[in-house]
Image (cartoon, rainbow, N blue to C red):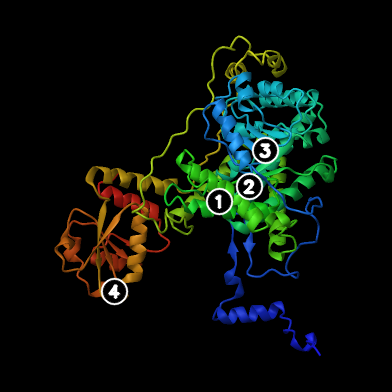
């Protein structure tokens, strides 16, 4: 007879939230449980524990339609081709490896209708979607639409009129771009292309300008509201517009916040559609996610693989429609075959090994993520309302509200990186001076603007379609971009977090190319290894972030008396009290590891202390100057 388990006897005692708090505070040795809380850039306080009793999740579906799976399309950029023939081959190879979307950013080499025929020869655009950027290259649109005549297809033109305007990527005034967009949507209707989107709202630019998830959501959706209102004035219905747009957001490094961001986007989209008087169920949001470029680094390149993998993971859990995984070496300017292959295979690991595509809304029901989603959606919506009170996205941009807000956030982020409160592995933390130096490729200009069409500045896109088989895209662009009458606007400032430290490393590498070695700093260690090692490790790690080598010396070595180079003294505070600093301070800039008070500094002749929380970037820049680096 089989033994039966009495669950009432063997079940563990159900732990209450209060019991958990009490046990946690015992482990914290008297500190409050709230000491584990952390404030994010979004303004959200992350609590140590989330339960049904301290969350606002109500069980609503956040604008998500019912689905059995969590499939997303593989949308890797195809960026290695320079000719139409090469592109056709690259697309075919990508499709063999499972690519679902023809994702093209720079297509200036597709100048003519025949170039397009060559590039897309033999491809079934009903089976594989396209994602084509029209940034600065609207002349491509009439040529490609002519090619699509009598073809069934699915895809997106990545065109963002107000986004490109505030991003400073071209000189067309907003009204002109809206006029062009209105004509593009009309052409898509007339050509019976119902599954082609004319707009991709770009949230990535706000992310890359320092914005948190809150700003990325708020400014992107404010952009969409402004555009919908502008096109409604031209007679377009919200139901027609909602099916012609998609949204692209960055997938950043804060894993759970990013999951919440994509889920919050669905909630905000549903709220906007309801406000415009249409049903969210009829127009589910189209979400594209691109692994962030904001946190990628040129040094210790392979760490970028890890970053991109977790970013794609968060986007997949967030329930997006398509994902672009950044190749680890994309930051260098030219992607290798290895970088391209690993990035594409990341999708298949998440789909076929981790099985993320088999579960609908994998994060659903998590008290933590549900609370983050609700709170983030509320914060973003409040920011959207603030922008609406200013008169909308365009007015907020003209008043520099958006730009100034993002500049402030970017400054905060850079300060955290400079103080090493935020770690960029291989750059400001655990830098490796032995890694091989790599050549940085400069991006090429991708679309020539000719003077050939200057005599036809008023021509409409529909007119150009008549001549599509004989005219060049650059000739059409010349006519379109001849109107450069926009008012001056302060554009966004986009950069990567690592750029300042990469500048330090670049200066040190240049120094090495001249003198045969990296700049060096003498470090005098006091006492036993056990006494000085913790501070020594901190100092040497900090120096390597600036491309500076450490030379470890004992006080009695003759090199310690150098008068023309900076010197760092490293030991316990007690060792400093008995050490005669005069033997190293004569004419030299002397620094001590640790925090000393002003009296100690004055008495010993130490110029400055080196400690956790200092502005490491500023210190390294000064040190390089003293070493003759910059």
Q: CA distance from mark 3 to mark 1?
A: 22 Å
Q: CA distance from mark 1 to mark 4?
A: 39 Å
Q: CA distance from mark 2 to mark 1?
A: 22 Å
Q: Please give the residue where the numbered disc 4 appears in the rendered image.
A: 529
Which residue is rendered at x = 36% and y = 60% of the image?
A: 541
Q: Residues within 10 Å of mark 2 (few under 14, many from 20)?
A: many
Q: In front: 72, or 169? A: 72
Q: Please give the residue where the numbered disc 3 appears in the rendered image.
A: 201
- Horizontally, residue 429 falls left or right of residue 390, namely left
Residue sitting at the far front:
1
Q: Please give the residue where the numbered disc 1 appears in the rendered image.
A: 308
Q: How many marks?
A: 4
Q: Please give the residue where the numbered disc 2 appears in the rendered image.
A: 215
Q: CA distance from mark 4 to mark 2?
A: 48 Å
Where residue 310 sits in the image (x, y, percent)? 58, 55
| Tag 1 secondary structure | helix
Residue 574 visible at all:
yes
| Tag 4 secondary structure | helix
Please state which of the two labelled residues, at mark 3 or mark 1, is closer to the viewer: 1
Q: Residues within 10 Å of mark 3 (few under 14, many from 20)?
A: many
Q: Are marks 4 and 3 in contact (CB under 8 Å)?
A: no
First along the sequence among labels 4 and 2: 2
């Amino acid at each position: 007879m089989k033994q039966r388990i009495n669950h009432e006897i063997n079940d563990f005692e159900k732990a209450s939230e209060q019991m958990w708090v009490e046990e946690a505070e015992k482990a914290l040795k008297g500190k409050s449980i709230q000491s584990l809380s952390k404030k994010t850039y979004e303004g959200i306080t992350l609590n140590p524990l989330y339960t049904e009793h301290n969350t606002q999740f109500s069980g609503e579906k956040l604008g998500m339609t019912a689905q059995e799976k969590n499939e997303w399309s593989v949308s890797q950029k195809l960026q290695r081709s320079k000719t139409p023939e090469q592109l056709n081959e690259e697309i075919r190879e990508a499709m063999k490896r499972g690519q679902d979307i023809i994702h093209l950013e720079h297509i200036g080499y597709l100048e003519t209708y025949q170039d397009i025929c060559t590039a897309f020869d033999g491809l079934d655009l009903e089976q594989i979607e396209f994602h084509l950027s029209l940034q600065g290259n609207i002349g491509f649109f009439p040529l490609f639409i002519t090619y699509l005549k009598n073809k069934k297809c699915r895809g997106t033109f990545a065109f963002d009129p107000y986004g490109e305007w505030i991003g400073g990527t071209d000189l067309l005034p907003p009204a002109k771009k809206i006029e062009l967009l209105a004509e593009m949507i009309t052409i898509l209707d007339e050509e019976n292309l119902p599954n082609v989107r004319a707009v991709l709202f770009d949230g990535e630019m706000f992310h890359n300008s320092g914005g948190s998830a809150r700003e990325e959501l708020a400014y992107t959706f404010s952009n969409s509201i402004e555009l919908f209102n502008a096109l409604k004035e031209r007679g377009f219905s919200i139901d027609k517009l909602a099916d012609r747009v998609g949204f692209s957001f960055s997938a950043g490094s804060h894993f759970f916040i990013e999951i919440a961001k994509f889920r919050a986007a669905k909630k905000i989209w549903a709220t906007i559609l309801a406000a415009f008087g249409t049903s969210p169920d009829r127009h589910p949001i189209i979400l594209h996610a691109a692994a962030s470029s904001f946190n990628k680094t040129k040094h210790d390149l392979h760490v970028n693989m890890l970053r991109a993998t977790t970013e794609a993971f968060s986007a997949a859990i967030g329930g997006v429609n398509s994902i672009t995984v950044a190749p680890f070496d994309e930051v260098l300017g030219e992607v290798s075959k290895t970088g391209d292959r690993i990035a594409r295979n990341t999708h298949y690991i998440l789909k076929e090994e981790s099985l993320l595509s088999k579960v609908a809304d994998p994060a659903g029901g998590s008290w933590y993520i549900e609370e983050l989603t609700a709170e983030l959606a509320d914060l973003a919506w409040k920011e959207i309302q603030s922008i609406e009170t200013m008169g909308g996205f365009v007015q907020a941009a003209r008043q520099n509200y958006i730009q100034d807000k993002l500049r402030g956030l970017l400054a905060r982020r850079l300060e955290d990186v400079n103080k090493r409160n935020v770690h960029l592995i291989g750059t400001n933390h655990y830098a490796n001076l032995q890694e091989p130096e790599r050549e940085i490729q400069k991006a090429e200009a991708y679309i020539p603007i000719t003077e050939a069409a200057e005599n036809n500045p008023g021509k409409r896109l529909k007119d150009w379609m008549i001549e599509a088989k004989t005219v060049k895209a650059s000739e059409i662009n010349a006519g379109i971009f001849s109107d450069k009458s926009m008012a001056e606007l302060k554009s966004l400032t986009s950069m990567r977090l690592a750029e300042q430290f990469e500048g330090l490393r670049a200066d040190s590498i240049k120094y090495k190319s001249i003198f045969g070695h990296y700049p060096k700093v003498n470090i005098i260690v006091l006492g036993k290894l056990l006494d000085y090692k913790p501070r020594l490790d901190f100092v040497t790690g900090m120096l390597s972030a600036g491309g500076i080598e450490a030379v470890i010396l004992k006080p009695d070595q003759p090199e310690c008396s150098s008068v023309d180079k900076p010197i760092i003294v490293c030991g316990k505070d007690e060792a400093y009290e008995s050490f005669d600093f005069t033997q190293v301070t004569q004419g030299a800039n002397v620094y001590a590891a640790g925090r000393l008070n002003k009296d100690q500094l004055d008495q010993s002749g130490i110029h400055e202390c080196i400690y956790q929380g200092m502005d490491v970037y500023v210190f390294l820049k000064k040190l390089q100057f003293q070493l003759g680096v910059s």
